[in-house]
């Protein structure tokens, strides 16, 4: 697959603002490994090869095991995830798949039971931001660095 354009060089100002959202999330108290799982799962759903590659690597650098990384796509069936991670992954899927349904009160309440309000706000921003990155990556066919 051939990359369609270098959006970073053509829309550098937009990238700076997106990076600002990432900095906001990074400054939260959400654990880095959890954030990488969230970013990986949204990227899998959205089919963004660039982001799946990046966040798999970033998760590994944050201490994730191969077993957990391989199981992110089937997290509901896998025994490797904490209740907090399951709540975050459930929210991520619901917020990423908006065209197939709403974020139910049950999904929201599950997340709210495992995160403080500021953490939940950061999770909302994290999921929205990775979805935006995914859409840019898919639209331009960003290719992973090998």
Image: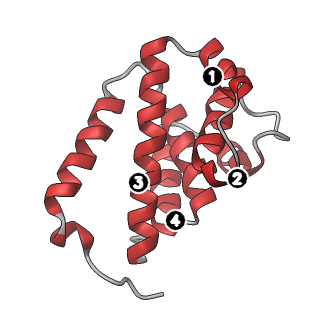
Please indicate whether residue 33 sits to the left or right of residue 122 in the image.
right
Could you tell me which residue is drawn at 82 percent across and 33 percent down?
Answer: 79
Q: Earlier in the sequence, mark 2 or mark 4?
A: 4
Please report contact status of discs 2 and 1: CB closer than 8 Å, yes or no: no
Q: Which residue has dot 2 on it? A: 100
Q: Secondary structure at mark 2?
A: helix
Mark 2 to mark 4 CA distance (whole Å): 19 Å
Eyeballing the image, is 138 above or below 14? Answer: below
Q: Which residue has dot 4 on it? A: 48
Mark 3 to mark 4 CA distance (whole Å): 11 Å
Of labels 4 and 1, the one closer to you: 1
Q: Percent x, y for residue 47?
A: 58, 66
Q: Which residue has dot 3 on it? A: 132
Q: Residues within 10 Å of mark 2 (few under 14, many from 20)?
A: few
Q: Percent x, y for residue 53?
A: 50, 62
Please indicate whether residue 80 sits to the left or right of residue 35 in the image.
right
């Amino acid at each position: 697959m051939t990359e369609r354009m270098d959006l970073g060089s053509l829309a550098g100002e937009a990238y700076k603002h997106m990076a600002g959202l990432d900095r906001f999330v990074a400054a939260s108290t959400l654990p880095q490994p959890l954030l990488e799982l969230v970013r990986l799962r949204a990227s899998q759903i959205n089919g963004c090869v660039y982001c799946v590659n990046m966040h798999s690597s970033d998760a590994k650098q944050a201490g994730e095991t191969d077993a957990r990384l391989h199981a992110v796509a089937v997290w509901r069936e896998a025994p490797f995830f904490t209740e907090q991670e399951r709540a975050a992954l459930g929210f991520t899927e619901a917020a990423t798949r908006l065209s197939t349904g709403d974020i139910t009160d049950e999904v929201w309440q599950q997340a709210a039971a495992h995160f403080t309000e500021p953490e939940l706000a950061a999770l909302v921003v994290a999921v929205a931001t990775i979805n935006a990155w995914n859409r840019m990556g898919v639209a331009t066919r960003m290719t992973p660095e090998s």
